[in-house]
Amino acid sequence: MGEQPYRWTPQGVGAALALPDGYRRASVESARGEWAIGMVPGGTRSGAVQMLPVRWNLATGAVNLLPFPGANGVAGNGELLVSDGAPLVVAPDGTSRRLPGHPDVRATEAGTYTAEGISDDGLTVAGAVYEKRAYRPLVWRCTR
């Protein structure tokens, strides 16, 4: 185990997860259904290690580096929740949908919207909107 990502079944059986090519260690941060997300250490910038997000398909064993600064959650269907000031939901096939802003709020800076949780089906996202110097809870209910 140590620096190798690991998964455990409900029966207590453990197995190592694959590492992305060229990386020697990773950590798992969240798992839902047949999917998990985590981080691998990338390059160094200004003396700090830049962490890169990864997603595992636990059914197939596949692991992929993600082209985002981070992932806040993973749904049971494999959809990722990416929060970068304007939350984004990304499907396993790479298609994405940006979550709409609240009509009464002018998004003037990154961090106006945060998204921290996603339902198993990827259709409900919980987060907040920053307005009038305070965060206010916000829930997005999506349709397909």
Image: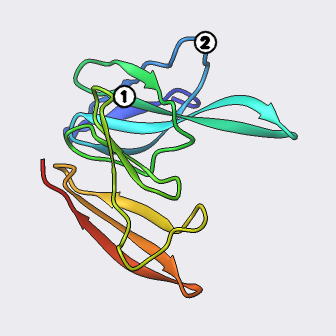
Disc 1 vs disc 2: Cβ atoms closer than 8 Å? no
Q: Which mark is residue 56?
A: 1
- Please report the residue visible at 52 percent of the width from the left and 58 percent of the height from the top: 85
Mark 1, other Cα within 10 Å: few <14 / some 14–19 / many ≥20:
many
Residue nearest the observer in this picture, 135 or 38: 135
- Image quadrant in which you'd find residue 14: top left
Question: Which amino acid does the dot numbered 1 rest on?
Answer: Trp
Q: Position of residue 104 (x, y in %)?
A: 39, 80
For residue 83, above or below residue 10: below
Residue nearest the observer in this picture, 115 or 98: 98
Question: Which amino acid does the dot numbered 2 rest on?
Answer: Gly
Residue at the outermost top position: 21
Mark 2, other Cα within 10 Å: few <14 / some 14–19 / many ≥20:
few
Please state if 3 lies on the left or on the right of 32 as rendered. right
Q: Position of residue 21 (x, y in %)?
A: 54, 12
Task: Give the structural element (helix, strand or loop) at label 1.
Answer: strand
Please state if 51 lies on the left or on the right of 62 as rendered. right
Please state if 25 lies on the left or on the right of 114 as rendered. right
Task: Identify the residue under disc 2.
Answer: 22
